[in-house]
């Protein structure tokens, strides 16, 4: 049974053209349909500006699509809720709260009693390997440790779905590999349904059961690839795997290919230029 059903999502923004200063429509996402199973790890890759984060915002309930529907366990998503945890690359920790109190935030929102709250916090702080740092503040932690706190906080209140928007983009390569291995270990243990946005093909293949490859804007699904690599996985093991190299090369070719109409597609590693426009609130049109 599918955990998440995404049916024909379309997102349109009203923008002001920077040259003519006239309002016009900008299609960010179009014809986006996907079925995600319970406990599945999905990675999404595509060129900069293709609508990956727009898609994740819609699933989180932070924004509403122009058309199309999202259902989790058959229920229509109409806004944010505690059945979804959201982890961003900017950590988004409360600087005035210790590690324990940051992890406890979602539990406080759910009105979990203090004693139980502290027990749950300890469990997830242990899970992400931050024993001994319970009373530290975010400014006393490295970037990798802050991201572990963010992961622990999102897991602690037990969401059904974990949404991750390039969570390891801001850390160095060695820390990133460590966090990838940690996330795989945590996922193997918790079996959460995860949607993971990344610009890294290697990271997408390492982590996922399936990789969704998106087209440049308007963002559509170009192809969905099953990643039939054995689990458990580690970054070090995958680096020397021929099958892993073949899959990553296949995805790279998908992203390098020309459009069907003959125009040139921008490689994933090269950021596409931002739209030379401003998004306008509808009330200003």
Image (cartoon, rainbow, N blue to C red):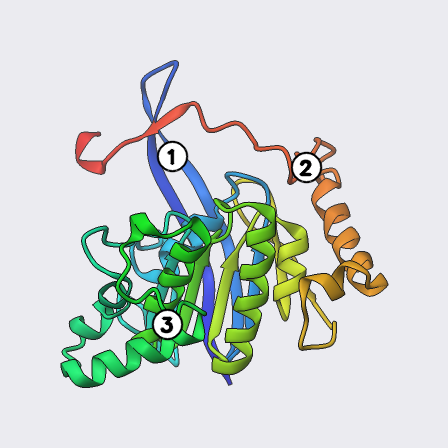
Q: Secondary structure at mark 3?
A: helix
Q: Distance from label 2 to label 1 (Cα)?
A: 25 Å
Q: In this rendering, which labeled residue sits more in front, label 2 or label 1? A: 2
- For the point 46% across and 65% down, which residue is it? 7
Q: Secondary structure at mark 2?
A: loop
Callout 2 environment at 10 Å: few (<14), some (14 to 19), or many (20+)?
A: some
- Residue 15 visible? The answer is yes
Real-space Cα distance between discs 1 and 3? Answer: 45 Å
Select label 1 or label 3 by which is in front.
3
- CB under 8 Å between callouts 2 and 1? no
**Residue shown at the point (28%, 59%) measured from the top left:** 136
Q: Is residue 79 visible?
A: no
- Closer to the chain start, of discs 1 and 3, is 1
Q: Position of residue 90 (x, y in %)?
A: 37, 47
As drawn, which residue projects farthest toward the right? 242
- Residue 12 vertical placement versus 194 (above, below): above
Label 2 belongs to which residue? Answer: 267
The residue at the point 45 percent across, 69 percent down is 129
Residue 249 lies, in percent from the top left, at 79, 51
Asked whether the beta carbons under mark 1 and mark 3 sit within 8 Å of each other, the answer is: no
* Residue wearing tag 3: 125
Q: Relative to 89, is 278 above or below? A: above
Q: Nearer the viewer, mark 2 or mark 3?
A: 3
* Quadrant, the C terminus: top left
Give how far across and how far down residue 277 sits, in percent: 38, 25
Q: Earlier in the sequence, mark 2 or mark 3?
A: 3
Of residue 35 and residue 82, the one placed in the foreground of this image is: 82
Q: Is residue 275 left or right of residue 281?
A: right
Q: Which residue is mark 1?
A: 25
Q: Is residue 280 above or below residue 222?
A: above
């Amino acid at each position: 049974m599918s955990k998440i059903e995404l049916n024909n999502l379309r997102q349109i923004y009203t923008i002001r053209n920077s040259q003519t200063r006239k309002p016009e429509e900008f299609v960010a996402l179009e014809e986006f349909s996907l079925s995600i199973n319970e406990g599945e790890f999905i990675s999404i890759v595509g060129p900069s500006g293709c609508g990956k984060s727009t898609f994740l915002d819609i699933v989180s309930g932070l924004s509403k699509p122009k058309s199309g529907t999202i259902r989790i366990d058959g229920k229509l998503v109409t806004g944010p809720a505690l059945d979804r945890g959201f982890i961003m690359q900017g950590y988004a920790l409360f600087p005035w709260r210790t590690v324990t109190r940051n992890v406890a935030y979602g539990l406080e929102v759910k009105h979990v009693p203090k004693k139980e709250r502290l027990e749950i916090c300890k469990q997830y702080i242990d899970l992400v390997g931050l024993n001994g740092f319970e009373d530290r503040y975010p400014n006393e932690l490295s970037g990798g440790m802050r991201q572990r706190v963010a992961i622990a906080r999102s897991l602690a209140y037990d969401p059904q779905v974990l949404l991750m928007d390039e969570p390891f983009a801001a850390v160095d390569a060695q820390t990133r590999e460590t966090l990838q291995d940690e996330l795989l270990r945590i996922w193997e243990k918790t079996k959460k349904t995860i949607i993971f946005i990344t610009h890294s093909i290697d990271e997408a293949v390492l982590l996922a059961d399936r990789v969704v490859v998106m087209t440049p804007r308007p963002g559509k699904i170009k192809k969905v690839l099953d990643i039939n690599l054995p689990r458990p996985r580690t970054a070090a093991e995958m680096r020397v795997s021929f099958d892993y190299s073949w899959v990553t090369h296949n995805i790279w070719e998908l992203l390098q290919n020309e459009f069907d109409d003959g125009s040139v597609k921008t490689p994933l590693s090269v950021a596409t230029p931002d739209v030379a426009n401003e998004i306008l609130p509808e009330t200003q049109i």
